[in-house]
Image (spheres, rainbow, N blue to C red):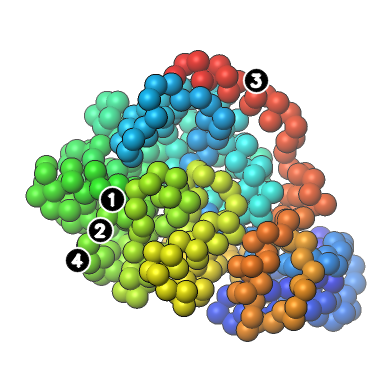
Amino acid sequence: MATRFENGIVVTLGKHNRVIWNGAVVSDGESIVAVGEAADLKKRFPEADTVDCAGKIILPGFICTHHHFYSTMARGMAIPGEPASNFVEILERLWWKVDKAIDGEDITLSAQIPLIECIRNGTTTIIDHHASPSMREGSLDLIENAVREAGLRASLCYEVSDRNQPGGGTKENERFIKKVGRGDGQIAAMMGLHASFTLSDQTIETCVGIAEDAGVGCHIHVAEDAADRKDSLAKYGVPTVERLHKLNVTGEKSIFVHCVHVDESEMDTIAATKTAVVHNPESNMNNAVGVTKVLKMLEKGILVGLGSDGMSSDMLAQMRCAYLLHRLDNHDPRVAFMEAPQMLLGNNADIVERQFGIRVGELAEGRPADMAILDYQPPTPLNADNFLGHLIFGLVDATVDTTVCRGQILMQNKQILSMDEERIAARSRELAPQMWKRL
Ligand SMILES: [Zn+2]
């Protein structure tokens, strides 16, 4: 049955961005079948169900290309001991304790909570990086079930690391990759690797072999902190990207997350191998690790996308953070106006296409019916030429009213339809303190 999402301002994005006032998008099944003037589409699809979008703007669903669902249950937790003074201490005192404490039902809940938040923020496609060393086996299936129940799209992987046991997580990741295969457009798989400084050559070689056999890429944190670069130089005599390149981790399907501490020749390697980079500005600021030289990378033709690294599921907030950060970092108020939206709206869609084999991020006939519909009454004229101004200074603070993924309405009038938000949050409040005690 077709549905007309009508009477809103439609912003198509894609290569030929169009802004259509009194526009409509018609979905049928999982796909968009028409985009245009509301009056025209009413004539062409008179039988369709209708969703009135008056006073709203209809955009393609947002994409997060690096997330950690599992980090949710640490929210509000007191961290024992002295405050961490650097990045490695943050991992040792917080995240490596949290991931070890997550068990059983926590895995499902700690995925469901951010999935609800993704729906609330209109984020319809997520590339996640999971770790739960106390319960590895089957953990990705639990997350997959949560994603399918939520109705969103996600690429999943398990974070392989030698830090608890040599090659820990390889089996779970391999099992899931084989199970998912080429994916069904809703669930995809990658080979997850933690970071160079917690991985031996042997573990990386094994994982790259599995990924190559299956035709999937690797999803790895790269030079997030200076410590990762220092470790690689000390142990292997080359900086992080060069080490990973020698081990064949680079490539068009791979994602190098962060790349804060990389030099120009490493950037050239990333560009030459068409490896994607994902920038996480809020997370980098939170961990005080430094500023990724995103503008230089984009100049070199590197595909740089935008993630949240578990900080939140609000991708417009990540976009504005990137816009502000790179203006300040470059001491130049002329930069980042084009680049920050490009990372979120264009480059993230390119990265998803490499992973899922589908083209999201555009409202056009034949494209997946993934939409974020936000309350927005433009206070000034809005057209394709000035859309970015509205995006950065207006839409970033607008509320998402309706979220659609694969043609399914997951939230309408700000009510989550696909999941029981109240029950899930209550159960998570119950289990989180127990998880905190296991730290
Ligand atoms: Zn991360």
Q: Secondary structure at mark 2?
A: loop
Q: Which mark is residue 312?
A: none
Q: Residue furthest front?
A: 331
Distance from Cα at disc 3 to Cα at disc 4: 50 Å
Q: Which residue is mark 2?
A: 262
Place of residue 384 in the rendered image (x, y in percent of width and height, measured from the top left) = 65, 82
- Amino acid at dot 2: Val
Q: Secondary structure at mark 4?
A: helix
Is residue 378 positioned above or below 281 on the image? Answer: below
Residue at the (40%, 38%) spot, across then down: 158
User: Which comes sooner in the sequence, label 4 or label 1?
Assistant: 1
- Amino acid at dot 3: Glu
User: Which comes sooner in the sequence, label 2 or label 3?
Assistant: 2
Distance from Cα at disc 1 to Cα at disc 3: 37 Å
CB within 8 Å, label 3 to label 4: no
CB within 8 Å, label 1 to label 2: yes
Q: Is residue 214 visible?
A: no
Disc 3 crowd, CA 10 A, few/some/many (<14, 14-19, 20+):
few
Using residue 237 as the reference point, say whether residue 138 is left or right of it.
Answer: right
- Amino acid at dot 4: Ser
Disc 2 crowd, CA 10 A, few/some/many (<14, 14-19, 20+):
many
Distance from Cα at disc 1 to Cα at disc 2: 7 Å
Q: Quadrant of residue 395?
A: bottom right
Is residue 257 positioned above or below 322 on the image? Answer: above
Q: Which residue is mark 4?
A: 265
CB within 8 Å, label 2 to label 3: no
User: Which comes sooner in the sequence, label 3 or label 4?
Assistant: 4
